[in-house]
Amino acid sequence: MNHSISLTINGARRKVELDDPRVTLLDLLRERLDLTGTKKGCDRGQCGACTILVDGRRINSCLALAVSFDGAEITTIEGLARGDELHPVQAAFIAHDGFQCGYCTPGQIMSAVGLIAEGQAGDDPERVREAMSGNICRCGAYKGITEAVIEAQAHMTGAKRGEAA
C-alpha cells in the first residue's frame, strides 16, 4: 500500500510516494532524495548526526517516520547556504575549527541553527554545551563547536537588530 506525502525540502516542494510506512525521514532524505549531507550515525536517536529542522524545530530524523510529516517544511544541511554564501553557523564552524573528521558536523550545524532560532543559545558556553548535548562528536571538537555557536548567535542577533533599526 503506497502513501503519498508532500514535503517542502530546502525550499522546494516535493511529492513522494512511500511504499513502506516505516521509512524514516533520514532514509527518505539519503536513499530516495539523494540528500546525503544528513548522516546516519547510531540510527537510534543517541548521537545527533541525523539532526535536521522540521518546521524550524530540530529533530533526529532517524527516529521520525516520513509519513508523519506530510506537509512539513524540512531544512537539511544542503539548504543552509545561499549560493556561495555560507550560513553564519557554517562560517563560524570553519572559523573556530568546530570539526575534525567532519562526520557529525552537519548534525552539529543543524542543531546549532535550531538552537539559535529557538532562542536557547545565549552567550554562556555551559548553556550552549547543555543545549547541544544531544549531538556527539567522537573527535572531541566541543570547544570549537561551542565557540562557533556563540559567535554565530551573536552575529545573527546583531544582524537582526540591524534589520529592525
Image: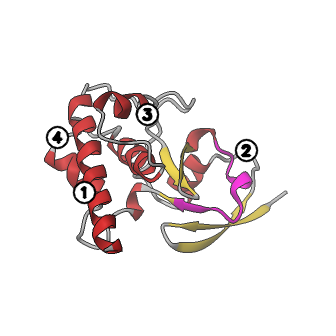
Residue 121 in sight from this viewpoint: yes
Badge 1 crowding class, 10 Å Cα cut-off, few under 14, some 14 to 19, many 20 or more, is some
Seen in the image, is 35 located left or right of residue 142?
right
Mark 2 lies on residue = 22
Mark 4 lies on residue = 97
Mark 1 lies on residue = 155
C-alpha span from label 4 to label 3: 19 Å
C-alpha span from label 3 to label 2: 29 Å
| Residue closer to the observer: 86 or 33 | 86
- The image shows residue 115 at horizontal and vertical percentages of 43, 45
Mark in the foreground, 4 or 3: 3
- In the image, the segment drawn in magenta is 64-74
- The image shows residue 131 at horizontal and vertical percentages of 43, 33
Comes first in the chain, label 2 or label 1:
2
Mark in the foreground, 2 or 1: 1
Badge 2 crowding class, 10 Å Cα cut-off, few under 14, some 14 to 19, many 20 or more, is few
Looking at the rendered structure, the secondary structure element under dot 2 is loop
Residue at the location (32% across, 71% down)? Answer: 82
| Residue closer to the observer: 123 or 151 | 123
Disc 3 to disc 2: CB gap under 8 Å: no
Mark in the foreground, 4 or 2: 4
| Residue closer to the observer: 138 or 86 | 86
Mark 3 lies on residue = 131
C-alpha span from label 2 to label 1: 40 Å
For badge 2, the amino acid type reads Arg
Residue 69 in magenta stretch: yes
